[in-house]
Image (cartoon, coloured by chain):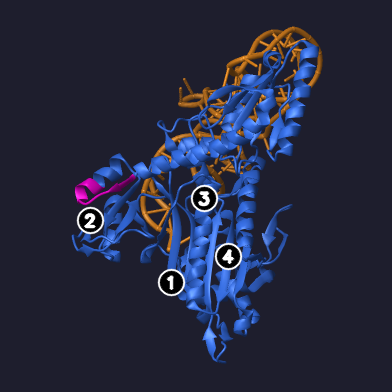
Chain colours: A blue, B orange
Amino acid sequence: MGKEITTREQDYSQWYNDLVLKGGLADYSAVRGCMVIKPHGYTLWENMRDQLDRMFKETGHQNAYFPLFVPKSFLEKEEGHAEGFAKECAVVTHYRLKADPAANGKLIVDPEAKLEEELIIRPTSEAIIWNTYKDWIQSYRDLPILVNQWANVVRWEMRTRLFLRTAEFLWQEGHTAHATKQEAVDETIKMLDVYATFAEEYMALPVVRGLKTESEKFAGAEDTYCIEALMQDGKALQAGTSHFLGQNFAKAFDVKFLNKENQLEYVWATSWGASTRLIGALVMAHGDDDGLILPPRIAPLQVVIIPISSKDSVAQTKINEKAQQLVKELKAANVSVKYDENDNNRPGWKFAEYEMKGIPVRIALGARDLEKNVAEVVRRDTKEKQNISLDALTNHVINLLDDIQKNMYTKAKTYRDEHITKVDDWNKFEKILDEKGGFISAHWDGTRETEEAIKEKTKATIRCIPLNAEQENGKCILTGKPSKQRVLFARAY
RNA sequence: CGGGAGGUAGUUCAGCCCGGUAGAAUACGUGGUUUGGGACCACGGGGUCGCAGGUUCGAAUCCUGUCCUCCCGACCA
């Protein structure tokens, strides 16, 4: 046997690590808290990125790029923002190394090369961007500014986990500037919807749209909206955020514009982001004990064709020819496909390998199949096998990919819906949390103190105040004080 | 940052207690037989034992320091 995967039941954390490592998405690196994203994982990210990028452009945004370094003084300008990130910033203090006079071949930081002002490696780019927007904006005619950036950011985390929390990660951050509050609020919600649509339609990941509580919101925001997803161990994971920043950054960086009435006003702002953390969500929402299961619409590879080789060279030639023809047909139909003729590994090895990597569809083609003019088609999500006529194969695969995408979403949504439990008394709250997990829909009196007390007692936090939820009078799960709406609690990543 | 585990071949690990020629499996290379769920035979290449000191005739093994990784916890808009 080759690579073994720890089962979810044995050790959920280890199962997750096994899927990421053995599924070929990423490796640990020599650098603390940082990972290497391998080609399989990076292609997955590229597919996610490309789709999001299309959606951003469809909604009127353009990409730009701002510096990796943020002068420390910029970060200080917005008070809440500064406090929120201070503890996890990497700081550049020098700009030169030199040979160590005391040790041959060693380098030391040149004490002569200290920076006048330290540079912070961006944990996010609001500061540097708003400093720039100040120069871009004079009149309402300069607005809105709808800019997105694809970048890496650094947050010096104490404890890291592959994709879920790494010191450096890849993301996109949208930063928009508007003339009116309403326009900025609308933008915030619009981008939340883009994330939700992307998660559900492309990642097959059902999400709850909601508003963060005061204590969970972004440092520097007026309101933080989020999409929350549920993992198979019953823990929640924030899959994207969209912030209404009010005029906080405009005031901090003195960004004003002249309105139509020739009056100076502060600009209204939003920011929104989604990161490689989404890959972690994908792994934990869909994977099984045999490996990754990737949704066809973003899978790095949709179909793999595996020959069952024959010692009869005539039969072997036929297999190769047929496989090449299938590759051609599928590619013409816009399906990504690979014919794995590598002779080092036998078919069984390849079956296991591509299952581990989560490739949605596998086609096995051998001499016996050719005699019957069929191929064995196996779908990764259910492992169901079918013999399909070679003449109908391309069409079948196209439909199958579509079906897998839908089935993955339905399965995840069924699980998610079964794990939203309405709870109205405290004992049951703790019991559900420990025994069943998932989201608990319960009343909350709206105070930070109660939220904190519940977190202290149970480790569960308010994941969000769901949007469009029905108004319903009730009593706070902990204090019994009146409440008008249920919120979602969960233990979270 | 606290607790635990660990660092020896590409990988997973044994060897360490009790110091004395660095091992296994797997992967890799060549040749052959194979190929419908992780094949087999033969031969072969591959390791400054995380790093730095110390003890010793001699250190993977004992001592000191240090770096790094994983797991649990604290922390984490």
Label located before the other in sequence (2 or 4):
4
Closer to the N terminus: mark 4 or mark 1?
Answer: 4
Residue matched to label 1: A222
**Disc nearer the start of the sequence (4/3):** 4
Report helix, strand or loop for mark 1. Answer: loop
Kindly tell me whether residue A82 is visible in this rendering. no
Residue drawn at 76 percent across, 28 percent down: A325
Image spot of residue A228 (x, y percent): 43, 53
Q: Nearer the viewer, mark 3 or mark 1?
A: 3
Specify whether disc 1 shares its chain with disc 2. Answer: yes
Q: Which residues are magenta?
A: A420-429
The numbered mark 4 sits on a residue in which chain? A
Q: Is residue A462 above or below residue A287?
A: below
User: Closer to the N terminus: mark 1 or mark 2?
Assistant: 1
- Going by the numbered disc 3, the residue's amino acid type is Ala
Q: Residues within 10 Å of mark 1 (few under 14, many from 20)?
A: some
Cα–Cα gap, marks 1 and 2: 26 Å
Give me the disc on residue A174. Answer: 4
Residue A164 in the figure: left or right of residue A99: left
Residue type beneath disc 4: Gly
Closer to the eye: label 4 or 3: 3
Q: Is residue A213 left or right of residue A200?
A: left
Mark carried by residue A199:
3
Q: Earlier in the sequence, mark 3 or mark 1?
A: 3
Picture coordinates of residue A473, whole percent (x, y): 23, 61
Q: CA distance from mark 4 to mark 1?
A: 16 Å
- Label 2 belongs to which residue? A477
Is-magenta flag for residue A421? yes
